[in-house]
Image (cartoon, rainbow, N blue to C red):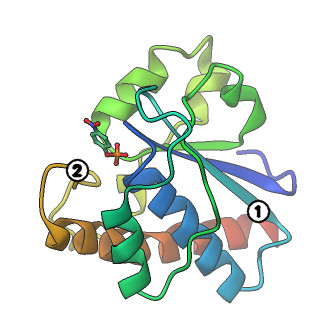
Amino acid sequence: MSTRTPYRVLFVCLGNICRSPAAEIIFNAVAAQKSLSHLVKADSCGTASYHTGSKPDHRMLAALERAGYSYGGHRARTFRRADFSEFDLIIPQDEYNEQDILSLARHDEDRSRVRGMWQWFAPEETERSVPDPYYGGPAGFDAVVALLTRSMERLVAELSAKLQA
Ligand code: 4NP
């Protein structure tokens, strides 16, 4: 695993309007709490292009606000092959996102940068991926924010140990 700084992390979901912008916002907040903002840089994107240029879904922004997070102005964009070179760690939110990203990988070096968000889930989590809240109600958005918050503590702790070793 690379340890260059700033260490660049890319969160990926399908539309880049719900899960991955939430992951980016929560990652930045947790990194700031731990005074690591100067060592890491996060972005997010989607595997599909239909929401390109859009703000995050208002239901996700409301769930983030309820949990105390603030939106920094992200606009949706689509994953591109160049992201394999521009990011040190690429984090799909579910196994479909993972398959779509891996189908664009050119070699093992690209594949080695891809690690599903579930790799930082605590053993007691019942989810096996970050569930897509798009077609459900507000509770699904709150559940995604809570799951990402718990998992992000574990991801940021891992990066903190590596980057400050
Ligand atoms: P996301 O959620 O991948 O977490 O941004 C979705 C956003 C849009 C759609 C599905 C999921 N959609 O079908 O438009």
In what element is the residue under mark 1? strand
Which residue reaches farthest top?
106
Residue 143: name its quadrant. bottom left
Residue in view at x 68 percent, y 30 percent? 83
Does the rendering let one see residue 125? yes
* Image spot of residue 159 (x, y percent): 67, 65
Residue tagged 1: 40
Query: Which of the 4 image quarters holds residue 149?
Result: bottom left
Q: Is residue 47 left or right of residue 158?
A: left
Pick the quarter of the image with the C terminus.
Answer: bottom right
Q: Does label 2 point to a residue whose CB lies under 8 Å from ligand 1? A: yes
The mark lying in front, picked from 1 and 2, is 2
Mark 2 nearby-residue class (10 Å; few <14, some 14–19, many ≥20):
some
Q: Quadrant of ligand 1?
A: top left
Q: Which residue is mark 2?
A: 134
C-alpha distance separating marks 1 and 2 = 29 Å
- Residue at point 87% right, 56% down? 5
Label 1, residues with CA under 10 Å away: few <14, some 14-19, many ≥20: many
Q: Amino acid at mark 1?
A: Val
Quick one: label 1 or label 2, which is nearer the N terminus? 1
Rendered-image quadrant of the N terminus? top right
